[in-house]
Structures are given as structure tokens and as C-alpha cells.
């Protein structure tokens, strides 16, 4: 962003922080010893496909276990191993640049939201665990996070375009922004399934805010199409094997590595009751967020009822479907013969009484405005955070799923007291900085303990209660 040829302070800060991060990451690579965790296993998993031409997902794996990631992971790490010559140090340097790119994307999200103070940007550059996930461990979680952030920026573009087009009195269409968002989200899902945590708020953005039925269907087709295209070699040979391994939803995690449930016994941790309970809480928490925050339209004409997720969201969808399907049939009828047009004219005359209500429905749908850049990004960040809150198990690398967008959630918090002014903003920065330090402690405590797990879950619950409810 520039004003009269001058770079904005936010962009200057982001650029300086990225330069600092690159230098710091390279120093970490040089002076901090590399510890093998999954890099060799990743290589063994992708080599089965690229070197040995194995298409059966049940036969792909490494010394740490079977391959459990979708096809995008195979292509991604196959390319990384090829471009780095399979050398660990070269791969670390590449991941240092990927880390900086991820930081730039995340900081751009914070900057465009307009809610996070510029001084707080540096808080996202001080995480020991995040540097480890990228530059020392080279986990696929970091690569997945990059594409998730690209998706968030794409959805934010819908709000930006609406603002620009409104100023120019142009017709507003956010379909392309949503299309790009779902494409990036599908690529992220093909690398690791945790990207699906963004899907519920993304669907609310797609269905609930003025897209046509055909744009909705196109986004769904693109999301599924990317998955099918990437997995085609496996789907054409061993489809059941691929779907069972790449999208295994019943996998039981190892108690040794859990970060969030060490305060439970191992028997309780692996129980189906815990899994079903967490799933129920996850679904309920999503519906509460959707009803209270994601789909709540207040700026309506005088006397109009406030619209909420239950049940206006679903009613609007069916009205959109009816409107667009009817429009398609009317368009088809208009190209028929003159006798058919005459018959249709008679039908329209008989149904003239219904046209008024249809016009009212169309006008009501036209009043639906795409959320602001901040609101669009916040919805996606909150949906992802709820998934982390209700996760059956969190491993150390999962911190990258939500760390970068935590400031966005924290500075949009709900409060009975609305604080304003510089002094209160300093208080907010101190408060939110304390929360992030608390989380950093929990994620860096190795091995995790009952106390660190309980503190992590309590902090997550507090964030949900104060920032999402």
C-alpha cells in the first residue's frame, strides 16, 4: 500500500521484519544442530511413488509408519527433495525462505484487517517453536499453512473488491475471490487434512453472502476437482487404498506426543467416548460461532428483522437457488419459438400476482453485503481455532496451524467494556502478549506435562469465551 508514492508504515514494518526473520533463520540453521524427526520418513514415503512407481497407498510409507497424507504432499515433497538434491542443509535453507514467505502472508493479513497494532507485528516473529517447525524440522504443517494463508487473503480480496466497486458504482461480484480461496484451500488440504478446519467459515462466506447458485457450485467443483486431479494416478489404480489412507478419519494418535491431553490417562485419551465428545463439542462450537458472529446481519432497513444463522442462512440459500434456477429457465424459454414465447407470456400474466413477492426476495438478496476484510479473515481464523480447541490430539508441529493469526482473534475480542485510547491499547497489547507467551510456554514444554496441557486447554477455552462467543 502506498500513499502519494510513499510506502505505508505497516508495509515498511512488514518488510523489515521479514528481512530480520530471514537473517535469524539462516543463523539458526548455521548454529543450531539439526535433529532428525520426519525428514527421512517423508523421503521414504515419496520415493515409493517417484522412484519405485508404487501406486498402492497401503504400500507407501517410511520407518515411522505408513503414508497418511493426500497426494499433494507426495508432489510437494517430491519436488522439494528434487530441487534440494535430497540434502538436509539445502532443504533447511529452502524452508527458511518458506518460513519468511509465510510470515509475510500472515503479516499482510494482520495489516489488511486494520485491527492489530503495528507494534504487535513483532510478536509473531519471536516464536521458538515456529522457527523449529520450519527451519529445523521441515514439517509439512508449515507448507500447508502457507496455502491456508493464501486462501484467507483470497477471501479478503472479495471485501476489497466490493469496496472498490462500490466507490465506482459498479456491479459487485465476489465469485472470483471465493473461487481462488477454495482453490488454495483445496491445495492446502491435499498436503494435510487440517486445512479442512477452514471449510465451515469458508462455506458461510460462500453461501451466506450474495453468491449465485452457479458460483457456489463452481467453487465446490473446483475444491473437489483439485483433489481429484492431484490424486488421479492413485484413484485410477487403487482408489480404495488411497481414500482409506489419505483421508483416514478414525486414526488414533499416540499418547506420548500429545500436547493438549497429558492431564488425562492414556486409556481415556484413546477412548471412543473422548473422540465422540470432542466431535460433538466441535460441531456445537461452530454453530454457536456461526449464529453469534459469522452470519449476523444488523444493517437492515428500518423495521426489518435481524438475520441470524438459524434459520435465515438456510432460507437465503433456498431463495438464491430458486431465483437462479428460475432465471435459467426463463433464459431458456426466451430462446424458443414465437409460439412458445406467446404461451409463456400467458403464463406470466396469470402469475403476475407472484412477481411482486419474487422481486422483494431478489431485492432482499441484493442487500446482502460481503463482510469487511477484517470480518472475512476473522471468520476463517476463528473456524480454524475452534478446530484446534476441539482437536483429539495436538502435536508440537500443529502450533503452526493457528499461531500467526492469533493476534487477529485476540484484537477482535468481545468485551463488556470497549476500551479506547492509547493507554487502553497498550493494556490490550500487554494482555494479548501475555496470552501468546502463555501459549508459547505450553508449546515449548518438552515433554508436555499434565500442567502444561491443562494450561494450554484452559487458555484456548478462555480465548474462545472472550474472543469468539
Image (spheres, rainbow, N blue to C red):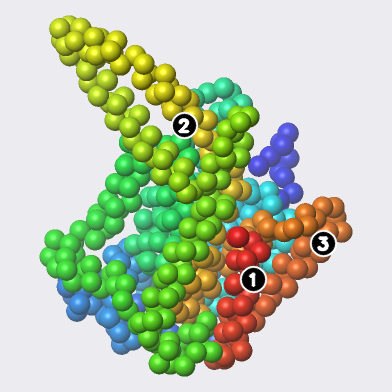
**35 displayed left or right of 435:** left
Name the residue at 23% across, 9% down: 346
- N-term-proximal mark, 3 vs 2: 2
Instruction: Work out which quarter of the rendered image holds the N terminus and state it.
Output: top right
Give the CA separation, mark 3 to mark 2.
41 Å
Q: Which of 456 and 132 is in front in this view?
A: 456
Assign a secondary structure to mark 1: helix
Whole-percent x, y for residue 54 in the image: 17, 73
Q: Which of marks 2 and 1 is nearer the N terminus?
A: 2
Left or right: 131 with respect to 20?
left
Q: Earlier in the sequence, mark 3 or mark 1?
A: 3
* Front residue (pair 212, 239): 212
Label 1 environment density (alpha carbons within 10 Å; few <14, some 14–19, many ≥20): few
- Whether tag 3 and tag 2 are in contact, CB under 8 A, the answer is no
Residue displayed at 23% across by 71% down: 244
Secondary element at image label 2: helix
**Can you tell which mark lies on residue 426?**
3
Give percent across and percent down for residue 99: 54, 66
Q: Determine whether label 3 and label 1 are within 8 Å by CB.
A: no
Which residue is labeled 1 in the image? 462
Question: What residue appears at the point 59 percent right and 42 percent down from the top-left corner?
Answer: 372
Residue 451, compared with residue 1, is above or below; it is below
- The percent position of residue 378, horizontal first and vertical second, equals 58, 54
Amino acid at each position: 500500500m502506498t500513499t502519494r508514492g510513499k510506502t505505508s508504515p505497516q508495509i515498511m514494518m512488514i518488510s523489515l521484519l521479514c528481512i530480520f526473520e530471514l537473517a535469524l533463520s539462516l543463523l539458526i540453521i548455521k548454529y543450531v544442530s539439526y535433529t532428525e524427526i520426519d525428514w527421512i520418513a517423508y523421503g521414504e514415503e515419496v520415493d515409493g511413488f517417484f522412484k519405485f512407481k508404487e501406486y498402492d497407498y497401503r504400500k507407501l510409507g517410511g520407518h515411522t509408519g505408513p503414508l497418511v497424507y493426500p497426494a499433494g504432499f507426495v508432489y510437494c515433497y517430491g519436488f522439494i527433495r528434487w530441487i534440494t538434491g535430497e540434502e538436509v542443509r539445502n532443504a533447511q535453507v529452502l524452508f527458511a525462505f518458506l518460513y519468511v514467505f509465510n510470515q509475510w502472508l500472515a503479516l499482510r493479513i494482520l495489516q489488511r484487517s486494520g485491527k492489530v497494532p503495528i507494534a504487535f507485528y513483532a510478536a509473531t516473529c519471536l516464536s521458538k517453536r515456529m522457527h523449529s517447525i520450519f527451519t529445523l524440522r521441515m514439517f509439512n504443517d508449515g507448507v500447508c499453512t502457507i496455502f491456508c494463508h493464501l486462501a484467507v487473503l483470497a477471501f479478503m480480496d472479495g471485501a476489497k473488491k466490493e469496496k472498490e466497486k462500490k466507490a465506482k458504482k459498479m456491479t459487485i461480484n465476489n465469485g472470483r475471490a471465493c473461487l481462488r480461496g477454495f482453490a488454495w484451500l483445496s491445495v492446502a488440504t491435499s498436503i494435510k487434512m487440517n486445512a479442512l478446519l477452514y471449510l465451515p467459515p469458508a462455506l458461510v462466506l460462500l453461501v451466506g453472502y450474495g453468491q449465485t447458485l452457479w458460483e457456489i457450485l463452481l467453487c465446490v467443483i473446483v475444491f473437489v476437482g483439485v483433489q481429484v486431479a492431484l490424486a488421479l494416478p492413485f484413484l485410477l489404480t487403487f482408489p480404495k487404498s488411497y481414500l482409506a489412507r489419505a483421508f483416514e478419519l478414525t486414526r488414533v494418535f499416540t499418547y506420548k506426543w500429545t500436547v493438549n491431553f497429558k492431564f488425562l490417562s492414556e486409556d481415556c485419551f484413546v477412548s471412543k467416548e473422548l473422540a465422540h465428545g470432542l466431535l460433538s463439542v466441535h460441531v456445537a462450537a461452530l454453530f454457536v460461532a456461526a449464529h453469534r458472529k459469522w452470519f449476523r446481519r444488523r444493517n437492515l432497513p428500518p423495521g426489518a428483522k435481524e438475520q441470524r444463522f438459524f434459520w435465515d442462512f438456510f432460507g437465503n440459500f433456498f431463495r438464491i437457488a430458486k431465483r437462479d434456477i428460475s432465471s435459467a429457465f426463463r433464459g431458456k424459454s426466451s430462446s424458443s419459438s414465437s409460439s412458445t414465447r406467446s404461451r409463456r407470456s400467458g403464463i406470466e400474466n396469470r402469475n403476475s400476482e407472484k412477481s411482486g413477492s419474487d422481486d422483494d426476495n431478489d431485492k432482499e438478496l441484493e442487500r446482502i453485503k460481503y463482510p469487511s476484510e477484517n470480518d472475512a479473515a476473522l471468520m476463517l481464523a476463528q473456524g480454524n481455532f475452534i478446530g484446534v480447541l476441539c482437536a483429539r490430539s495436538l502435536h508440537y508441529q500443529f502450533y503452526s496451524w493457528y499461531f500467526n493469526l492469533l493476534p487477529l482473534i485476540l484484537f477482535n475480542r468481545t468485551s463488556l467494556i470497549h476500551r479506547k485510547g492509547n493507554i487502553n491499547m497498550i493494556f490490550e497489547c500487554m494482555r494479548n502478549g501475555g496470552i501468546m507467551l502463555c501459549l508459547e510456554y505450553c508449546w515449548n514444554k518438552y515433554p508436555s506435562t499434565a500442567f502444561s496441557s491443562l494450561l494450554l486447554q484452559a487458555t484456548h477455552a478462555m480465548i474462545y469465551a472472550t474472543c469468539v462467543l
